[in-house]
Image (cartoon, grey):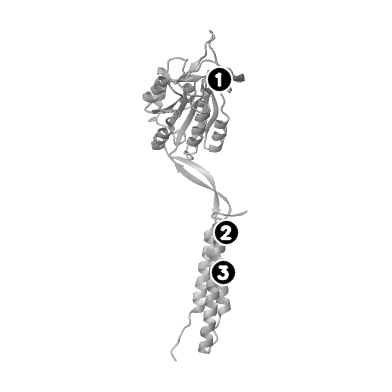
Amino acid sequence: MLTWAYPDFVAVGLVLAGCFLLLLRQWRRTSRMGRALGTRPRNRGWKLMLRLAIGGCLLAAALGPALGVSQQPVRTAGKDVWLLVDVSRSMDAADVAPSRLLRAQAELQKLVAQFPADRLGLVVFGAEAVVQCPLTYDQEAVQVFISTLRTSLLPAGPTTLRAPLELVLGRLAPIPGATLPAATAPRATALVVVSDGEDFGENLEPVLQSLGRTGARIYAVGVGTAEGAEIPKAGGNVVRNGRGKVVRSRLRAAPLRQLAAQTGGQYGELNNQQNGFGALLQSLRTMQGTVEQVRTVAVADNRYRYPLAAALLLLLLEVALTITVIRPS
């Protein structure tokens, strides 16, 4: 099926109209000169046809006619970016409008769009951790999974930061510096942890040491405020503890700062006054891929060479037929 790489047909139509007007003007001018000199201009018809054909071929080449697709290798030094998103009930708190989770979703959607050449994966966590989307180059798939995040995805229970870190650790590439074949060479890995920092799990030190040995960096975003907010429940109620007191969820930055500091990453906060995703995005962009990877992508097979070659041949034909050889008598 024939397609066009640059299908700007409006511009082409304007150019064709302009060329036709110029040729018409030249035709009339040649006719007037012939009548004034008492001669009859020769070969005007075929010259006009040749020039129209040359112009048509050049415009076709500029539009980029493509017939079929071809597989081409693309070399990239990409990264693996894991998005670890807290979906515990405390992420429904509204100290960040409209809620912690909804605000985080909006920022994650923007972040994903900035990494078209990198693989992205999504892990959700609360009382446990689950891979929601494995590493993929498909941005649209990651966007869809992010849009479906809800605090009801996982069973209720105490939040643990260790579970998602261990889950990603088990999927990381081998330690950088090891002698490996090219197919299993390590890739630069970044973990973007988005949470309010409430952690009721085990000691994070062992898993952070293991992550540090892989070369992975953690970029943590604390969502919430120090003042905190109540946690809403269905039916307009709020979460209460075992003694009937209203639970107020607050941002706990200390464990998130620890994640970033021990892996050479960065910490920022997301609330109504500041957006830590901006600085985080800049840091992720400057994080270079550790290895060059070859990907094969399907691209339209642009056949512009054929109409361009036809235009050049017709141009040479016009020049050859126009030249008059004068021989001495």
Instruction: Give residue 36's position: percent from left, percent from top.
Output: 51, 87
Tell which tag, 3 or 2, sits nearer the viewer. Answer: 2
Numbered label attached to residue 232: 1
State the separation of the CA atoms marked 1 and 2.
55 Å
Numbered label attached to residue 253: none
Instruction: Give residue 47's position: percent from left, percent from top.
Output: 55, 76
Q: Earlier in the sequence, mark 3 or mark 2?
A: 2
- Residue at the image position 56 percent from the left and 23 percent from the top: 151
State the separation of the CA atoms marked 3 and 1.
72 Å
Q: Earlier in the sequence, mark 3 or mark 1?
A: 3
Label 3 sits on residue: 53
Instruction: Give residue 32's position: percent from left, percent from top.
Output: 53, 83
Within the image, what quadrant is residue 21 found in?
A: bottom right
Q: Secondary structure at mark 2?
A: helix
Front residue (pair 231, 260): 231
> Tag 1: residue type?
Pro
Tell which tag, 3 or 1, sits nearer the viewer. Answer: 1
Asked if the residue under mark 2 is in contact with the one under mark 3, i.e. CB atoms within 8 Å, the reply is no
Front residue (pair 238, 128): 238
Q: Residues within 10 Å of mark 3 (few under 14, many from 20)?
A: some
Numbered label attached to residue 9: 2
- The number of discs equals 3
Taking 64 as reference, is 179 above or below it? above
State the separation of the CA atoms marked 3 and 2.
17 Å
> Tag 2: residue type?
Phe
Taking 44 as reference, is 92 above or below it? above
Residue 304 visible to an observer of this rendering: no
